[in-house]
Each structure stands twice: as structure tokens, then as C-alpha cells.
Amino acid sequence: MALITSEALADEGVAQVRQALDHQEPWSELPVLLLGHSVDSESAPAVELLGRSAHLVLLERPLGLATFMTAIDAALRSRRRQYEVKRLLETLAEAAREIERAHEEANRAKDEFLATLGHELRSPMTAIRGWIRMLKMGELDAAEAADALSMIESSTKVLAHIIEDVMDVSRIIAGKVMIDPALIELGPVVANVVATFRPSAALQGVQLSSDICNEPLTVWADDSRLQQIGWNVVSNAIKFTPRGGSVHVSLERLDRSAVIRVRDTGRGIPGELLPHVFERYRQAEAGGITQEYRGLGLGLAIVKHLVESHDGRIEAFSDGIGKGAEFVITLPLRGADPR
């Protein structure tokens, strides 16, 4: 706020005041109280001298103390509101910058994802084309031809898995993931998942163990989706565990919930990635992940959606690189039929 008398308008200092008023920021409209003898005769010259950027309030003398204090109070209130507007504009500008950064990050992550997807599709396709060419040329004997067909079948399964993951994400985005729940006992499901991955874990030199509660733990769930959840989490743990390491799967009851834990002694999760581990494309664009471990970054995002579709939750824990990781899935026991 500025307080000027009409006599001061003839002073050279008014030019400096005018310069300061003309260089205000867009949000600022400095209240200027002008004490004069005649509002009618002095208002036009004051506007001419101070410029239209000044929030000019003309007070005619003589004036009482109460009137003077009321004018000052109103001017200060106006100035405080302007500063509130400034803070709001700064908040909005920062939010806009955050949105822009998030948009750039999302675009970068998608570009990384597409590059990784191309690599993941090209590898099995190259193997399939190579084996087919050799079969067509008749260069293989019966045993080699059988191996070729086995390799082709394995590569097509890899392709089918990649395509199914991409389709699942598409369905999640469109809100079209179907859940067909029934009363399912968790123990046999978890045991089946462990049994499914025991041979592959052994081939990789990873010890896969389990501890499954003997108490019947029944949930409303889609059996195929439950297995998909288990396969994704357990296969992920085995993939990131080096030879000589271990993966332990447990099922227990905690109050009115069933808790599945998958703990490994593998690569671990960097602290900066841990809060984002269930976001789409994150593994594909995570720094420091070698090609050996790289994937599409879709599996855990799909798992999170499926767990939450069953009114459950999934959490990830890790003390950092080289210290392993633990994924904890909590599902409500029985509960209401989600249909």
C-alpha cells in the first residue's frame, strides 16, 4: 500500500512511484491512497501521473481518523487478497509443471515399453522363423526335427503370454476384465502354483519352498484369475533370484483375511522404484535392469488390478538392491459374493 498527498504529485519522486507501479506483476494492483482537497479536480491529474496500473483511492481532506483507518484497512485487505491470488497462481503453475513432467514421463515410459515389446516379440519370432526354415530345407534328422517342433511350441507360448498380458492391460484400461467368482479354498491353489514352478526353479538353481496353512481358507474368487496372480508373482520372484538363491511361498490366516507371502533372496527393488513397482511399464523403463531381467513391466500392474478386483490388496517390500523382495497379498475370507 502507498499513501500520497496531492502536494507530493508535483515532486520528482512521483516518477519513481509511477515506474514501480508500471512494473508490477500481473497479479499485483497496489492500493494507492491519495489525500487531496478536491476529489473531482485532483482525480484526473493523479491518474495521469500515477498511471492506470495504480489502484487509486481518493480521500478528500479534511477527514476523520475513523474514515482514514477504514480506508487503510480496506486497502490492506485488498492487498492480502492479491497475495492470496499470487499464492494460488503459483500453486496452479506448479501443478501444471507437475502434470507436464508426468506427461513427459508417461510418454517416455511408453516409448521404452514399445521398444521392449518389439524386442520381446522379435526374439521368439526369430527363433520360430529359423527353425521353420531349417525344417523346410530338410536339414534336420528325426530327433532334431522333434527338438525344432518343441522349440517352436515353446516360442509360441512365449508369444501367447506376451500378447495375453498386453490384452489384459487393454481390458483393464477399458474396464472389461471379467471376474467369475466362486467359493475357492486357497490352500490347493497356492500348492498348485508352487508345484507348477518347482521344475523351472530347479533348472535355474533356485530353491522353491512353501509353507501352507492346514486350516481351510475360503475366499470368493475367480479360480483362473487367482492362479494368474500366483503365477505372475512366483515367476517374477524366480526370475529375479540368481542361482543358489531361494524363493519361499507361504499361506496363513490373519484375523479375517488370508495372507499369501512370496519372499525371495534375489535382486531386490531400488528404493526409488518401490513406490512405483505396480505401475504399468515401470520394469521396462527402470534404470539398472539388465536385458536378462527386462520384461514388459505389465505383470505386477495386472496382478494389482486382479487382487483389488477381489477386494484384496498387494504390497511390495524390499531393503534395496541385492537384499531380496517380498510381495504380500491379502484377501478377505469368504465375505460377500462380489457379484
Image (spheres, rainbow, N blue to C red):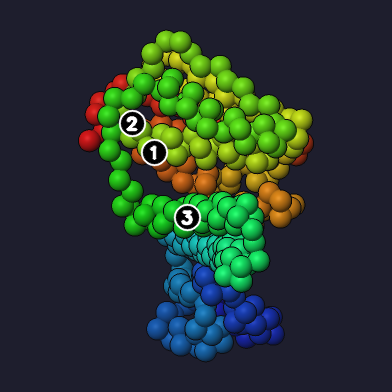
* Along the line of sight, the residue nearer the viewer: 339 or 91: 339
In this picture, residue 294 sits left or right of residue 222: right
Q: Is residue 318 above or below residue 185?
A: below
Query: In the image, what residue occupies the spot 42% across and 14% down?
Result: 255
* Residue 195 drawn at (x, y percent): 53, 27
Q: Where's the C terminus, which quadrant?
A: top left
Q: Where's the N terminus, which quadrant?
A: bottom right
Quarter-of-image position of residue 338: top left
* Along the line of sight, the residue nearer the viewer: 251 or 92: 251
Q: Is residue 160 above or below residue 202?
A: below
Tell me the tag on residue 221.
Answer: 2
Tell me the tag on residue 336.
Answer: none
Mark before the other along the chain sequence, 3 or 2: 3
What is the residue that sits farthest to the front in this orientation?
141
Q: Secondary structure at mark 2?
A: strand
Q: Secondary structure at mark 3?
A: helix
